[in-house]
Every structure is written in structure tokens, then in C-alpha cells.
Image (cartoon, helix red, strand yellow):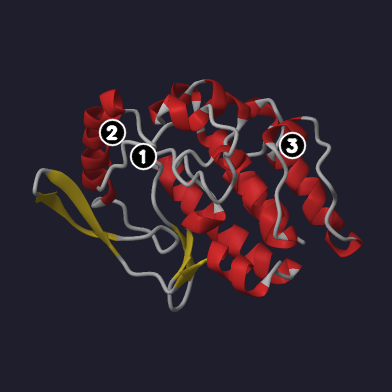
């Protein structure tokens, strides 16, 4: 962990460090083919560290290099993520940071990567109040992928919060773009092409404003598997 005081509120650093160490410890006990495997943990020069499997690339890398994905490839990635989320949720673990940069490609599969450590409230107010926040500049907060309840209070996240973030990520895989949380809340985000109309309908369900209106990972696995 190499904290940046320009991004993180200095008074929150010690708490973030404790959460990092806790997540590293918890990560060592997680074993699933759709979740990145933690190999080692410890402390060096007063900072906690975590060693994980090395990925070849991320979904974010693929989007940046090759553009939007076809429906079949995007669906394969989302199905893998849903399997990973089902496992994590059964272990009483909420990911809290699902996004293309954290969907990682190993040699033979796609997996969910880093579990979210940093909360929106941990960020330096000088950073979050700036007028220059963009998707590329805000890797810690993942603001574009946060459901309404997480933006309001990081303690209010549930399994359905991960579903929202995965829905936004799926939309981005298909379009190489995303809309603001307000656009998703209003269900006014631009549709992908007509060949992906079924995907759009499911994404709309996943990004419902109300948590209880979103389907579960198990429901989505059945629904998407039948496309």
C-alpha cells in the first residue's frame, strides 16, 4: 500500500491501512476460479502489502486497446463475474469496487480482482471538490460505478450494490463508454445497438435506483445464460 495524501484524506490513512491489512487477511481464505487468488501478505517499512496472481490484462486494457467488445465476449466476462460474486456473497463479502479495471484476464479465464478498500468518504475533500474529476483521474473512488446507496453511505452497500456496478461495467464493455450515475438512475443512458437490445434490458434491471429492484447474481446467471 502506497497511499497518496493528495487523494486520501490524511486523517483517514491509518483506518484505510487497517482495512487494507484486513482485506489481505480475508483474501487469503478466498478460493474460487472467478476470483483472483491472494498468495501472500505482510508488512514492509510500516506499510502492508498483498501479493496476488499476476493477470495478463484487464477488461479496461482490452477496451482501451481494441474498443467495445462484441456481445458474446462481453457476456462471457459478465457470466464469470457473476459466478465470482455468487461465491463472494455466499462468504458474506461485498466486493464494492466492480469495474473493468478490476475484471482481470488470466491465461484461461476472467476473474474479479481487487476488492474495494477505499471509500468515497476516505478521499481528500480538495480532490473530490475539484472540477476536474474524470473517469481516468479517479481510480480510487470509482465514482462512475458506485450505486446511489454507496455514494450516500459506504456502509449501506449490499450484494445488490455489486450488481449495479457490474451492470455499469457490462454497458461499458458493449459501448466503450458509460454514463453518469444520474443517467443510470433516470434510466436515460444511450442504448447499445439493436443487436444488443436484450443486454440493454438486463443492464437496465441491474442499474435500478432501488437496491431491492435489482436481480440477484443467481437470477442473472440464469437469465443471461439463456440469451
Q: CA distance from mark 3 to mark 1?
A: 24 Å
Residue 4 badge = none
- Mark 1, residue position: 117
Q: Are marks 3 and 1 in contact (CB under 8 Å)?
A: no
Report helix, strand or loop for mark 1: loop
Q: CA distance from mark 2 to mark 1?
A: 7 Å
Q: From what the image shows, is residue 104 above or below residue 157?
A: below
Q: Are marks 2 and 1 in contact (CB under 8 Å)?
A: yes
Neighbours of disc 1 within 10 Å: few (<14), some (14-19), many (20+): some
- Mark 3, residue position: 184
Residue 62 percent location from the top left of the image: 58, 70
- The part of the image, by quadrant, that contains residue 106 is bottom left
- Mark 2, residue position: 16
- Looking at the image, which residue sits at the far left? 45
Q: Quadrant where the C terminus lies?
A: bottom right
Residue 36 percent location from the top left of the image: 37, 60
Q: From what the image shows, is residue 6 above or below residue 196?
A: above
Q: From what the image shows, is residue 71 above or below residue 96?
A: below
Residue 79 percent location from the top left of the image: 60, 59
Report helix, strand or loop for mark 2: helix
- The part of the image, by quadrant, that contains residue 176 is bottom right
Report helix, strand or loop for mark 3: helix
Neighbours of disc 3 within 10 Å: few (<14), some (14-19), many (20+): many
Mark toward the viewer: 3 or 2: 2
Which comes before the other along the chain, label 2 or label 1? 2
Residue 201 percent location from the top left of the image: 81, 47
Which residue is found at the position 57% from the left and 36% from the top?
Answer: 146
Which comes before the other along the chain, label 3 or label 1? 1
Amino acid at each position: 500500500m502506497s497511499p497518496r495524501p493528495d487523494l486520501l484524506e490524511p486523517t483517514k490513512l491509518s483506518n484505510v491501512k487497517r482495512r487494507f491489512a484486513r482485506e489481505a487477511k480475508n483474501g487469503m481464505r478466498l478460493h474460487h476460479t472467478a476470483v483472483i487468488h491472494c498468495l501472500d501478505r505482510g508488512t514492509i517499512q510500516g506499510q502492508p502489502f498483498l501479493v496476488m496472481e499476476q493477470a495478463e490484462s484487464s477488461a479496461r486494457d482490452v477496451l482501451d486497446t481494441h474498443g467495445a467488445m462484441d456481445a458474446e465476449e462481453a457476456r462471457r466476462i459478465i457470466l464469470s463475474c457473476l459466478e465470482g460474486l455468487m461465491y463472494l456473497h455466499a462468504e458474506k463479502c461485498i466486493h464494492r469496487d466492480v469495474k473493468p479495471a478490476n475484471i482481470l484476464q488470466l491465461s484461461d479465464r476472467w476473474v474479479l480482482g481487487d476488492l474495494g478498500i477505499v471509500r468515497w468518504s476516505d478521499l481528500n475533500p480538495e480532490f473530490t471538490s475539484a472540477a476536474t474529476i474524470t473517469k481516468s483521474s479517479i481510480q480510487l473512488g470509482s465514482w462512475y460505478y458506485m450505486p446511489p446507496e454507496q455514494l450516500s453511505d459506504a456502509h449501506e452497500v449490499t450484494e445488490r450494490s455489486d450488481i449495479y456496478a457490474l451492470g455499469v461495467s457490462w454497458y461499458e464493455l458493449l459501448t466503450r463508454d458509460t454514463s453518469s450515475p444520474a443517467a443510470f438512475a433516470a434510466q436515460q443512458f444511450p442504448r447499445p445497438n439493436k443487436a444488443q437490445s436484450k443486454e440493454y434490458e438486463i443492464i437496465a434491471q441491474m442499474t435500478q435506483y432501488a437496491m431491492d429492484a435489482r436481480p440477484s447474481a443467481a437470477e442473472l446467471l440464469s437469465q443471461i445464460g439463456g440469451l
